[in-house]
Image (cartoon, rainbow, N blue to C red):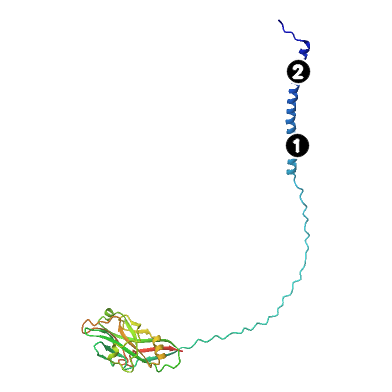
Amino acid sequence: MEDYVLPGEVNRSSSKNEISKTKKIFLITSVILFFIAIGIFSFVLGRNTTKESGETPTPSVIPTPTIVQISETPTPVSTSSATPTKKIGLSPTPSPILKSIIIPSTSGLDGFRSSSGGGNNSLEIRAGRNINLVSRGFVSFNLEDIPQGVTIKEAILKIHQSKIIGSPYSVGGALKLDHLSFGDSLDSSDYGMAALLSNVATLSSNTKIEWKEADVADMVRDDLAIGRSSAQFRIHFTTENAGGDATGDFAYFDSANTYTDNSGNKPQLVIKYQ
């Protein structure tokens, strides 16, 4: 049995197919036109941007400066000399003048005393030891020639080492000074007298035959302040022990008693004051 199609239905199917094709063409065309429009818009926008950024500014015209010559008349310089200012100079304060005095040791008050009770104040000054005893030296300086009220700036005791027997510095060490006040006579009790101040200075530490010196300014100031008429000192080795042989180990010094006019080796107290 054959299918039978009505003529009207055939026409309706053909119309539907044609409409579908038309829609497809329209959609495709619309999409193409849309992209073309976007491309044209982007192109135009890009050109405008390039023009705005690439425009070369018109250079400004810089006016040429006009040079004006000005003749200046120099101001005359005054040749008059200024009156110099007088400087008032202050006279420098003169330095105090130091005066000096050399006081020789007192004969009869320098010499030596020994631990055995013996000694001598009419020979040399000596210090040391032998197998039987230890000896200490003494020296005295009269201060009465120093003007009253002066300021003692310096006081140096000078004594000349004249002879060495044995090895006194090897066994006894250095020679020291004690500050004493033994008065107007030198006797055996002065060997062990209590010192005003012990070991006030080192007088010598070697056997060289020469002048030995010690600073005794503080002791002289003290003597003058107390009203003592003399500055007196005891000389002894640091270590004192009887020993050795009968000849012993001694250091000898010139005294006021052994001094002669030609030697110049009398003990001295050299004082500077103002």
| Along the line of sight, the residue nearer the viewer: 73 or 46 | 46
* Placement of the N terminus among the 4 image quadrants: top right
| 73 w.r.t. 10: above or below | below
Q: Residue furthest front?
A: 1
Give the percent coordinates (x, y) of residue 202: 34, 82
**Label 2 element class:** helix
| Three-letter code for the amino acid on which mark 1 is drawn | Val
Report whether residue 19 is seen. Answer: yes
| Along the line of sight, the residue nearer the viewer: 22 or 230 | 22
Give the percent coordinates (x, y) of residue 101: 41, 91
Disc 2 or disc 1, which is closer to the eye? Answer: 2
| Along the line of sight, the residue nearer the viewer: 103 or 63 | 103
- Tell me the quarter of the picture where residue 74 sits: bottom right
Say the numbered circle drawn on residue 16.
2
Report whether residue 101 is seen. Answer: no
Say the numbered circle drawn on residue 44.
1
| Along the line of sight, the residue nearer the viewer: 221 or 168 | 221
- Tell me the quarter of the picture where residue 29 sits: top right
Between the C-alphas of marks 2 and 1, the distance is 42 Å
Tags 2 and 1 touching, CB below 8 Å:
no
- Tell me the quarter of the picture where residue 51 sits: top right
| Three-letter code for the amino acid on which mark 2 is drawn | Lys
Give the percent coordinates (x, y) of residue 163: 28, 85
**Label 1 element class:** helix
Q: Is residue 164 left or right of residue 56?
A: left
Give the percent coordinates (x, y) of residue 201: 36, 83
- Which of the marked residues, 2 or 1, is nearer the chain's N terminus? 2
